[in-house]
Amino acid sequence: MIADSPQRTRVLIASLPDALRKLHPRDQVRNPVMFVAWVGSLLVTVFAIADPDVFTVAVAAWLWATVLFANLAEAVAEGRGKAQADSLRRTRNDAVARRLTAAGGEERVPGAQLRVGDLVVVEAGEVVPGDGDVVEGIATVDESVITGESAPVVREAGGDRSAVTGGTTVLSDRIVVRVTTRPGETFVDRMIALVEGARRQKTPNEVALTILLSTLTIIFLLAVVALQPFAIYSGGEQSVIVLTALLVCLIPTTIGALLSAIGIAGVDRLVRRNVLATSGKAVEAAGDVDTLLLDKTGTITWGNRRATELIPVEGVDERTLAEAALLSSLADGTPEGRSVVELCVERYGLSAEATAHEKTGEFVPFSAQTRMSGVDLGDRRVRKGAASAFELGDVTRRIVAGIGQDGGTPLVVAENDVVLEIGKQLLITRGALTTFSVANDLAKYFAILPAMFAAIHPQLGRLNVMQLTTPQSAILSAVIFNALVIVALIPLALRGVRYRPSGASALLRRNLLVYGLGGVVTPFAGIWLIDLLVRLVPGIG
């Protein structure tokens, strides 16, 4: 998320060169809605050059601004992904290795020159130059830049804690690392490839929405073309400039401009949470799953550790948590897993046998590798395991920390995970901005149609509810608003519409109220305010 106005301005300015490069027709043709706006801008520009006047030049300029702002939204989203990849590259390229020579000395070489089998020395404060195994010494390592884990981890020679990742930082002591991967094949290199490769793949939902927007564009194009014969018949022939302005204002340029940015930003938000998605389709598939985050807590040790209490996260019913905990423990043969089943049966009156028969699905047994057990019931996935195996929210993290401080061992029960929240957020953002974009058309009708036909049909003047000054100012105000609203919504497209776990009907009501009604009301106010300024321009007001 772009945190503040100065930073947002800097990001927009830095993305302008990329936005200008995207004006090439090769890039524009990939987005049918904005390609129509691009052709309209080109057409009006030709008329402005042939017969320049204030109104025509202003309309041409703001139509180009509409296309440019659409490119800017995509460039900003791509720029955030490039920043993530560049940050990872710096951890790879800036590392200088202290390679051991055959004579027992050291030589400093760039990390990119290391080969499999090389031995390198890494001491406190130094960056591990490449993936490898510790063959000598023990040290604490900060892996937060790679894994997001804030707590340092111990890496030592021998055993299952010997692997180190290039780009991580040694915090204490001294270790000798044997390089195990070639340059270009390290964990960081694979992360960079995933971050950059996941961005431009259109998802099925995005393709479907593009088809819908293209269909709406064709319908509006036919409607605008059909207006001219009626206008000629009525004795009020309209100029190509006015018809083009009407078309660009009516087609869904808002969502058309932001659609690509929404998808790119969705994958980027996962990267910021240290989750890599190989494609936007994977994120969307997760978003189609119903989501519920649950939490179950601590144990105390009587011989073997036993479950003693279930603590739900706010908004989750305790019995629902108990059912999920029971489901996720049926395939867990460890003492802890059996104690969870006993707790759910004894305290909440649930039946393990009945649950096993009723919930026919694929049970996932506990393993040391995954550190979790659970069950897959169609699209529903329930897991229970160590807190470190899950992506935890702030509330859950505080509960887990409190249990640990009291001497307990917290476990977490979750349906799906945080990735699904972003997947749903991606889908909701597209739907909300599509609703807003289509709802905008109502105000534009009230602005442009009276301006076009009030002279030949005076009764249409009643539709000028905003009391816009002149036909030229009304049309230009609508075009300007159409361009500016894209810029105003770029932060929302990148951040995503706020998602609160609730029923589909509640989400629909809220988004219709905010983005449907808001999409109707906002343009009336915006166009009216812009008209107050446009009327001051000589030749228009």
Image (cartoon, rainbow, N blue to C red):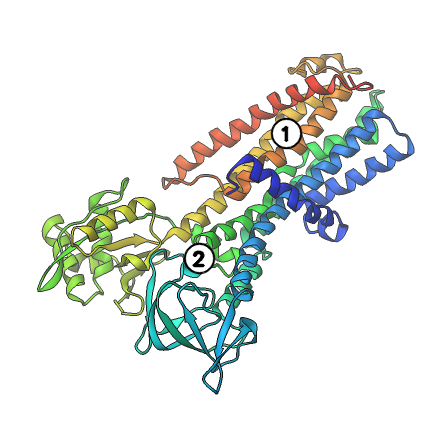
| Figure check: 8 above or below 471 | below
| Figure check: 51 above or below 109 | above
- Which residue appears farthest toward the bottom when viewing the image? 103
User: 530 or 91, which lies in front?
Assistant: 91
Q: CA distance from mark 1 to mark 2?
A: 38 Å
Give the image location of residue 393, x and y in percent.
34, 47
**Three-letter amino acid code at the position of disc 2:** Val
Q: First in sequence: mark 1 or mark 2? A: 2
Give the residue number, with chain letter if any, for mark 2. Answer: 275
Q: Quadrant of residue 168?
A: bottom left
User: 279 or 539, which lies in front?
Assistant: 539
Give the image location of residue 341, x and y in percent.
15, 58
Sort mark 2 into few (<14), some (14-19) or many (20+) by Cα contacts within 10 Å.
some
Sort mark 1 into few (<14), some (14-19) or many (20+) by Cα contacts within 10 Å.
many
Give the residue number, with chain letter if any, for mark 1. Answer: 441
Circles 1, 2 touching at the beta carbon (< 8 Å): no
Report the mark closest to the observer, 1 or 2.
2
Residue 382 in view of the camera: yes
Q: Secondary structure at mark 1?
A: helix
